[in-house]
Image (cartoon, rainbow, N blue to C red):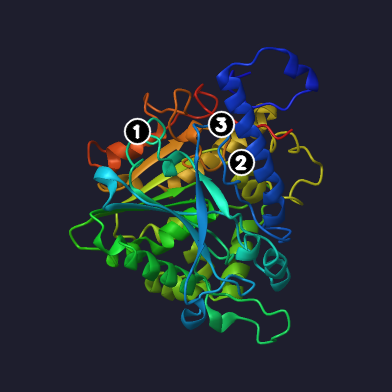
Amino acid sequence: MMANTARLRHPAWCWRKWTNRDWAIAAVAVTAFLFLLSSLSDDPRRDRRGGARLPAGDPAGAAADLVDLTLLRDTGAKGARCLDGSAPGYHFSKGFGAGSDSWLIHIEGGGWCASLSSCSSRAKTKLGSSAYMEQQVSFAGILSSEPSQNPEFFNWNKVKIRYCDGASFSGHPQSEPKDKKGRIFFRGQLIWKALMDELLSAGLSMARQAFLTGCSAGGLATLIHCDDFREQLPKDATVKCLADAGFFLNEKDISGNDTMRSFYHNVVQLQGVQESLNKDCIASKEPSDCFFPEEIIKNIRTPVFLVNPAYDFWQIQNVLVPDGSDPSESWKRCRLNIQACTPSQLKTLKGFRDSLLRALSEFQKSKEGGMFINSCFIHCQTWFGETWHSPNSPRIGNKTIAESVGDWYFNRRAVKQIDCPYPCNPSCYNMNFS
């Protein structure tokens, strides 16, 4: 058993002396457990309420900044509304010193809704309404203002965009249901535009350096809007994008069904997402295929960095082995704890990893692109202090994610880090939900 694997044990564990790393691992495990609970409502097969989202805090990292919620102004005139019609929101931490004219924008994750019923349920949560959002969130990892936790971007202007549309900020109002009773708003694209307008007026328009990042569904939103972000900023500014755990695969599940592809088809059809996708792609392919990152990255002109675990637990639990695909429950233990997988199941997981690497084969040839693909059983890693940059962070070639991203962003070296297959990397945080 790997020494840094997170475990939920019998209460007897509390009597032994824990190291700082033990507490860090436990904190990440509890946070990821909460993530798992929320992700159950975003299973592509079941399409129930809400979506998968990691909580805002990072109890495992250094002390995080608490940053207030700001609601967008003039949302009525701009048509920018969350699913329930409320004003979208964001959290802003002002930069200082040498970072005063540099901006890091991070898009929150949270899955998608693919039916009117699931979007209506989502509209009664913080993933669909600012009425339920926390008034303060902690900024850690890539958003931290602590140099020890975030050495490259600690003093930049930092923004966390709250996710409240259910379609990676790419829905369009012409697809909204006409019935006024219990109205649901599909305004993702308008939210994105209104957010950019407000941030540009707040100083983003004069940025010398800018970095658009996002986690999970926010990582997908980052890829969708990366070039638009670039186009709105000064031509001489350094502008790049990073998608964390946002490279969702168009793969069949273990029962041979296209669960994720069908789910994306429903999201795209419901919210009119095709209007936000690459026109050349949708002219030659089914629009839902163009919602997958493998297609999106073929057309992005702005430099992109991909942070992705090769054994992403969300994708294993929702793309490869979604509920209903395993009636015998032979995968029950494996999908919750990679250490419980049989040799045959590990072979299947390696095949899923191989599919990821095949999907990235052309991107690997890109001179401007970068990647950090580790072999951990985890999901988002950039906004946790422990996984982003700490003495115990996951590493490839003795580099943390933060160090690798910094080397790439500031052109210190080319970064195409691909880990060896599980279980070769002892620095991994491997979540255990059993």
Does the image show residue 258? Answer: no
Around disc 2, counting alpha carbons within 10 Å, would you say few (fewer than 14), some (14 to 19), or many (20 or more)? many
In the rendered image, residue 296, in percent from the top left (x then y), is placed at: 41, 60
Of labels 3 and 1, earlier in sequence is 3
Above or below, comparing residue 419 to residue 104 in the picture: above
Q: Taking the image as drawn, is residue 399 in sight?
A: yes
| Residue 324 as seen in the image, left or right of residue 247 | right
Please state which of the two labelled residues, at mark 3 or mark 1, is closer to the viewer.
3
Which corner quadrant of the image does residue 411 belong to? top left
Above or below, 274 relative to 220: below
Residue marked by disc 1: 403
Callout 2–callout 1 Cβ contact below 8 Å: no
| Callout 2 amino acid | Phe
Give amino acid for label 3: Ala
Q: How many residues crowd around disc 3 within 10 Å: few (fewer than 14), some, or many (20 or more)? A: many
**Front-lying residue, 51 or 367:** 51
Measured as percent of width and height from the top left, residue 58 is found at: 55, 38
The image's mark for residue 290 is none
At 60% across and 76% down in the image, what residue appears? Answer: 185
Q: Which residue is label 3 attached to?
A: 60
Indicate the secondary structure of the residue bearing disc 3: loop
- What's the mark number on residue 313? 2
In three-dimensional space, the C-alpha distance between marks 2 and 1, rounded to whole angstroms, equals 24 Å
